Amino acid sequence: MCTCVINFNLWACSLIQEQNIGHDVERQGGEGAANQGANQENLQKWLPISASRKAKWWYSTFHNVTAMVGAGVLGLPFALSQLGWIPGISVILVSWLVTFYSLWQLVQMHELVPGKRFDRYFDLGEHVFQGKVGFWVIMIQQLIVQVASTIVYSVTGGKSLKKFCEIMTPIMPMFDEIRQTYYICFFVCIQLLLSQIPNFNTLKGISLLAAFMSVCYSMVAFGSSLAKGIEHHPTHYGVRSHTTPGKTFDVFNALGTIAFAFAGHSVVLEIQATLPSSEEKPSKVPMWRGVVVAYTIVILCYLTVAVSGFWAFGDLVEDDVLVSLERPPWVIAIANLMVFFHVIGSYQVFAMPVFDTLESCLVQKFHFDPSRTLRVVARSIYVVLVGLVAVSFPFFGGLLGFFGGLAFAATSYIIPCALWLKAKKPKICSFHWIASVFCIILGVIIAVLAPIGGIRTIVVSIKTYKFYS
């Protein structure tokens, strides 16, 4: 009897002990999940895209203007010289309408799931396509756009500052013999400092100045081109190439140049992430208000610069219209300085999502502590590498066509519509279905043809270019 009691007590003790161990494991698992959730929340508060959500609707206006009205607008007269009057203006208008529609789709899908915000383009892709395929495809395309933009803006900043100093040489002769490479390096040094700005929302002052500068130099280019066009001088308004292969490649490159001019989609969800959101007033309301104002400014700047630049110089216009303008010298000098200040801000608008992705990867995959040291080192390495590419390959016109077709068409024309079709599933032959399919087809055409023209332009430029000159 005693033996039975003892065995029963031992069995009961072991059962209680097993239950306690189970409860400990469950408690530790719950604590681990809670800690993981807290760490993720703290990381989101540290990362530059999601750190602050106190932006106003008009912030999205000048962020979008800064992202679009930049290097692209100065290349539009050159695109018209490659396409001709009617095809060129038609492509600009169609691209504006198509990208306006696809940007609306992205704004609507930012809070596709009630209570959840997709702060990054690739987060939305991962959710819609339900797997890592959507994540990686969109992230790679988005990074190509953003990195390419920072490269092109580095080139543009260096060239614009060089043009300013050349015009001002009679006053400042010490700048006469400085190479373009050094101007790009100076631009990179400025970006090294500005890249330490902690988050997207704190860029508002720089972005506002950049947007204002972009509108100002667009109006300077418009006014100066009008003044030049009024003069009696021979101008030919045909396409610039005279051979069939040349015309074909020019058309390809022009498509990429125009696609580059509508490249703001790669940062639109990141801009929207800085806006507050509630059930009563979701972020899409103030975001869309800002986008409408921004896109109105965009089309006014694009058409005025494109038409006046091509009208003034015809098929002899340069790939940067400000290079074609020579008089009055002080106005052109100021315009180039405005371009320089604009691309300082636009560089940061496109670089901030890259910093966000880079820092998130270093913290989550390589287990670095989210510290100021990590931020300084990671961002500085990125800026230096981009600067090295910029001084090595400063082929402005070719870069626009190549990158414009390679990835800008995908992020602005194709991916938003593909996400919409997958997430919203509109009825076949309905308005949204037809519009989305049309956008995708147009984007595929640009993505296939434009890089060919861009590569050809780069190859032609390389024949006469001296590296690091």
Image (spheres, rainbow, N blue to C red):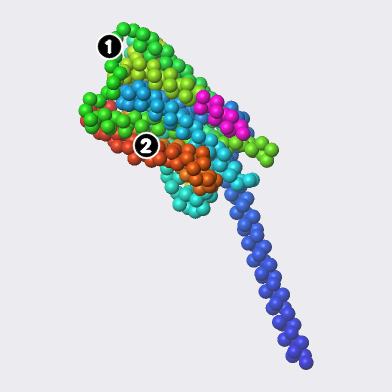
Q: Which residues are magenta?
A: 285-296
Q: CA distance from mark 2 to mark 1?
A: 33 Å
Find disc 1 in the rendering and name its residue.
234
Magenta stretch, main secondary structure, is helix
Task: Tell me: residue 79, above or below residue 431.
Answer: above
What secondary structure is found at the residue carrying circle 1?
Answer: loop
Q: Amino acid at mark 2?
A: Ile
The quadrant of the rendering that contains the C terminus is: top left
Disc ID at residue 445: none
* 355 to the left or right of 34: left
Q: Is residue 229 visible?
A: yes
Find disc 2 in the rendering and name its residue.
446
Instruction: Report the residue at 60% width, 54% height from top.
Output: 36
Q: Nearer the viewer, residue 250 or 337?
A: 250
Tell me which label, 2 or 1, sits earlier in the chain.
1
Task: Measuring from the top left, give residue 310's x and y in whole percent.
Answer: 35, 19
Task: Tell me: residue 9, above or below residue 216.
Answer: below
Task: Measuring from the top left, give residue 206's x and y in whole percent.
Answer: 52, 26
What secondary structure is found at the residue carrying circle 2?
Answer: helix
* 94 to the left or right of 108: left
* Label 2: few (<14), some (14–19) or many (≥20) C-alpha neighbours in 10 Å: many
Asked whether 447 falls inside the magenta stretch, the response is no
Q: Amino acid at mark 1?
A: Pro
Q: Is residue 379 visible?
A: no
Instruction: Report the residue at 51% width, 27% height from top.
Output: 295
Instruction: Report the residue at 50% width, 23% height from top.
Output: 297
Task: Tell me: residue 115, above or below residue 292.
Answer: below
Q: Nearer the viewer, residue 456 or 63?
A: 456
* Label 1: few (<14), some (14–19) or many (≥20) C-alpha neighbours in 10 Å: few
Task: Measuring from the top left, give residue 40's x and y in whole percent.
Answer: 59, 49
Please count the marks in the image. 2
